[in-house]
Amino acid sequence: WEEIDARFVPDKEYGENSLVSRGGHLTAVCAPSGKDAFITVADRKDHSLSWGIEGAKAVVPETVEEKIPETDDPAEGMFLEAMFNAQGSVRYPEILPGIDMTAHMDGRFKDCFVYQDRAAVKPVTFHINTPLHPEYDKDGSVILRDENDETVFFMMPPLLYDAKGSEGS
C-alpha cells in the first residue's frame, strides 16, 4: 500500500524548472511554457498526450500550495493531510495577455484558464502532440483512442463561468 501523493515537485529529469506529479495512474509534467508542447500527461501503459498553447508567453510554472485546515482531532488531521496530498496544482501566471492558467491533478488532470477581466476572454488554441487518434464529439469533448480503438484519455468540453455563476462554452 502506498499513499497517493499528487503534489507537483521539481524534477530536473524533465528539464530545468519542470514540475512533476506522479499521483495515481497518471504522471503529469508541467514545463516552462512558450514552446510547442509544455504539458505532458502519461499513463502507466506508456500512452502520452502533450500540448501547448498558441501564443503562450514563456512562463515558469509555480506550485500552488493549499493550506490544510487545522483540527484538534488527530484522525481528522490524518484524513485531511492524505486528502490534500492526493491533489496538486500548478499555476502559469499571465500565460496569455490577461489570462492565467492553472493545472490540477487529483487522479485526473484538468487545466483551467482564469481570465482577469471580460476583455481578456477570447478563444485559446491548443497544439496537441500524441500518437493517439482523436475523436471529436459534438459537445466539444475529445476522446483519444489507441491503435486498438480503446479509450485512453478523455478531454471534457471547455466551460466558462463568470463571478455570477453564469456558464458558457
Image (spheres, rainbow, N blue to C red):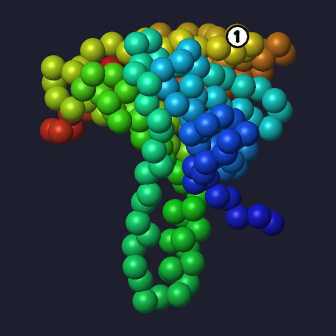
Measured along the vertical axis of the image, is residue 127 above or below residue 5?
A: above
> Residue drawn at (32%, 30%), measured in percent from left and top?
94
Q: Is residue 11 visible?
A: yes
Measured along the vertical axis of the image, is residue 164 above or below residue 7?
A: above
> Residue drawn at (70%, 10%), measured in percent from left and top?
133
Residue 25 image offset from top left, x and y in percent:
73, 44
> Residue drawn at (63%, 22%), measured in percent from left and top?
50
Q: Is residue 105 left or right of residue 146?
A: left
Counting other residues with Cα less than 10 Å from the Cα at mark 1, is it few (<14), some (14-19), or many (20 or more)?
some
Query: Which residue in the structure is indicated by mark 1?
Result: 133
Residue 83 image offset from top left, x and y in percent:
54, 64
Measured along the vertical axis of the image, is residue 108 above or below residue 2?
A: above
The image quarter containing residue 16 is top right
Quadrant occupied by the N terminus = bottom right
Q: Secondary structure at mark 1?
A: strand
Q: Is residue 168 visible?
A: no
Residue 162 image offset from top left, x and y in percent:
21, 33
The image quarter containing residue 93 is top left
Measured along the vertical axis of the image, is residue 140 above or below residue 75?
A: above
Q: Is residue 50 left or right of residue 140?
A: right
> Residue drawn at (57%, 62%), measured in percent from left and top?
85
| 68 vs 159, nearest the viewer | 68
Q: Is residue 111 left or right of residue 22?
A: left
Quadrant occupied by the C terminus = top left
Q: Identify residue type, mark 1.
A: His
